[in-house]
Image: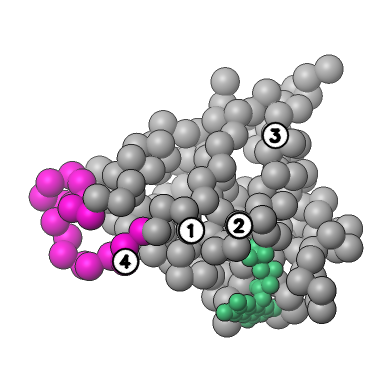
Amino acid sequence: MKKVLLINGSPRPMNNSQKMLNIFAEAAKKFGIETEIINLEKMNLGMCKGCLACFKTNKCFQKDGLNELVAKMEEADGIVVASPVYYGSVTAQMKTFMDRSGLLGEAHGRSFRSKLAGSITVARRWGHLGAQTDMMLWMDRTEMVHVGCGWCSATSTNDNDISSDEEGLQYPVRLAENFARIWNLEEMK
Ligand SMILES: Cc1cc2nc3c(=O)[nH]c(=O)nc-3n(C[C@H](O)[C@H](O)[C@H](O)COP(=O)(O)O)c2cc1C
């Protein structure tokens, strides 16, 4: 059974990013794809210190769950990251996750290489491109294979709720379908 790890970079507990990931998870289930959501805010990850000790010891010295999360990423077949747009970029939670997991994956011999990956953004109004680019460049550097779905993003405008963006809410479904197509998985009846 294929497994996809879903990484939520929003600091808000019940949030638009979570909504998009839930939609992906529901759609993925139809193809027998297992998912697990990781909430970065709950982990309270420390920032990367740039010490590069991970290249010597194969682990990060910070005891905040990052080593265990990277182990989960290495076991997974795919990884989907979701972030709200903050000032035209990803959240600090997502950036910290990308820095630290990326470096540790490199220390492990580029261990995320050839995994399927997807990127989801939500915003009130503007800046998807910056945040998407941040996450896609991380995927490129870590040698994952980015799966498109026609731009996986949803916008809320004034009420801060993406529920009325019907087009945006369809993208995670299509993303899950594209994972399934690449893996040759049939929809289960
Ligand atoms: C510090 C901060 C910066 C933000 N910057 C932007 C921005 O540049 N563009 C935008 O459209 N929305 C911006 N927003 C709004 C969020 O992207 C939007 O509310 C998003 O849906 C929140 O996602 P969440 O519900 O998953 O936390 C910002 C919000 C905060 C708190």
The extreme left residue here reads 56
Q: What's the CA distance linking mark 2 and mark 4?
A: 21 Å
Nearer to us of marks 4 and 3 is: 4
Marks 1 and 2 in Cβ contact (< 8 Å): yes
User: Neighbour class for label 4 at 10 Å: few (<14), some, many (≥20)?
Assistant: some
Location of mark 2 (residue): 13
Which dot marks residue 128?
Answer: none
Does the Cβ of the disc 1 residue fall within 8 Å of ligand 1?
Answer: no
Tell me which residue sits at (29%, 56%) in the image.
103
Which dot marks residue 28?
Answer: 3
Tell me which residue sits at (33%, 40%) in the image.
68
| Mark found first going from the N terminus, 1 or 2 | 2
| Mark found first going from the N terminus, 2 or 4 | 2
Location of mark 1 (residue): 41
User: Neighbour class for label 3 at 10 Å: few (<14), some, many (≥20)?
Assistant: many
Q: Which residues are magenta?
A: 45-62
Q: Amino acid at mark 1?
A: Glu
Say left or right for 88 vs 72. right
Tell me which residue sits at (81%, 54%) in the image.
169
Q: Amino acid at mark 4?
A: Met
Q: What's the CA distance linking mark 4 and mark 3?
A: 32 Å
The extreme top residue here reads 189
What's the magenta bit mostly, secondary-structure-wise?
loop
| Mark found first going from the N terminus, 1 or 3 | 3
Say left or right for 108 vs 160. left
Queried whether the magenta region covers residue 47, the answer comes back as yes
Marks 4 and 1 in Cβ contact (< 8 Å): no
The picture places residue 137, in percent across and down from the top left corner, at 48, 64
The picture places residue 96, in percent across and down from the top left corner, at 39, 64
Does the Cβ of the disc 4 residue fall within 8 Å of ligand 1?
Answer: no
Q: How many marks?
A: 4
User: Where in the image, quadrant-wise, is ligand 1 located?
Assistant: bottom right
